[in-house]
Image (cartoon, rainbow, N blue to C red):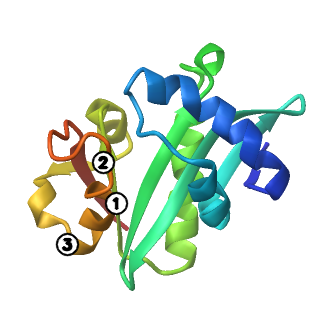
Amino acid sequence: MIRKAKIRDVLPVKRLIEPFARQRVILPVSLNMLYRSLRDFWVMESSGEIVACCALKIFWEDLGEIRTLVVKKEDQGKGLGSSMVSACIEEARDIELREVFALTYVPEFFEKLGFKEVEKSSLPHKIWEDCINCPYFPECREIAMTLHL
C-alpha cells in the first residue's frame, strides 16, 4: 500500500535509506531533514513494514524534484520504484506543477518512466541550495533528468 508518510515512519525510512547512502547510491539523509520534509514523502508499506519511499519536493511554482527514492533490496525488481515515482508524479500533476526533475545515479530507471537527461546547469539555481551542502559537492556524479507533465 502506497500512502503519505506519517511521523511514525521517520525512523523506519531512515533505516531503509542508510544502507544505500553508505553504498553511495543515494545521498545521506539526516533525521532532521526527514522530520522537516515528512510531508514530501510517500511510503510503501507491506505487512507492517516500510519497503519503499520517495519524495516530491516543490522548488517553484512550476517545478518539483523526485528525490530519495529507495526500495528495500529484497523487493527490488518488482516495480515498486516505478509505483513510488508514479505516486509523486500524480501528486505533482494534482498540484499543477509543469515539470519534475530527478538527480540520479541510475538514469536508465528514469528513462523508462519518460524522463529525459538534461544538463544540470539547465536547472534553476535554487536546486544548488541542496548541492552546496552535499558531501559529494563539487564532485557530483548524479545525472539530471526531467519530465514535462
> Which residue is identified by label 3?
125
| Residue at 28 percent of width and 56 percent of height | 131
Using the rendered image of the protein, determine whether residue 135 is visible from the camera's viewpoint.
yes
Q: Residues within 10 Å of mark 2 (few under 14, many from 20)?
A: many
Query: Distance of mark 3 from mark 2, alpha carbons?
Result: 14 Å
| Residue at 21 percent of width and 46 percent of height | 137
The numbered mark at residue 32 is: none
Give the answer, above or below, for where 27 lies relative to 90: above
Please state the horizontal and vertical placement of residue 75, each as a whole percent of the image: 64, 20
Please state the horizontal and vertical placement of residue 96, each as a whole percent of the image: 48, 81
Task: Name the element at disc 2.
Answer: strand
> Which residue is identified by label 2?
103
Q: Residues within 10 Å of mark 1 (few under 14, many from 20)?
A: few
Quarter the C terminus occupies:
bottom left
Please state the horizontal and vertical placement of residue 102, each as a whole percent of the image: 34, 51
Query: Identity of the amino acid at label 1?
Result: Asp
Query: Distance of mark 2 from mark 1, alpha carbons?
Result: 11 Å
Query: Identity of the amino acid at label 3?
Result: His
Give the answer, above or below, for where 145 lies relative to 59: above
> Which residue is identified by label 1?
130
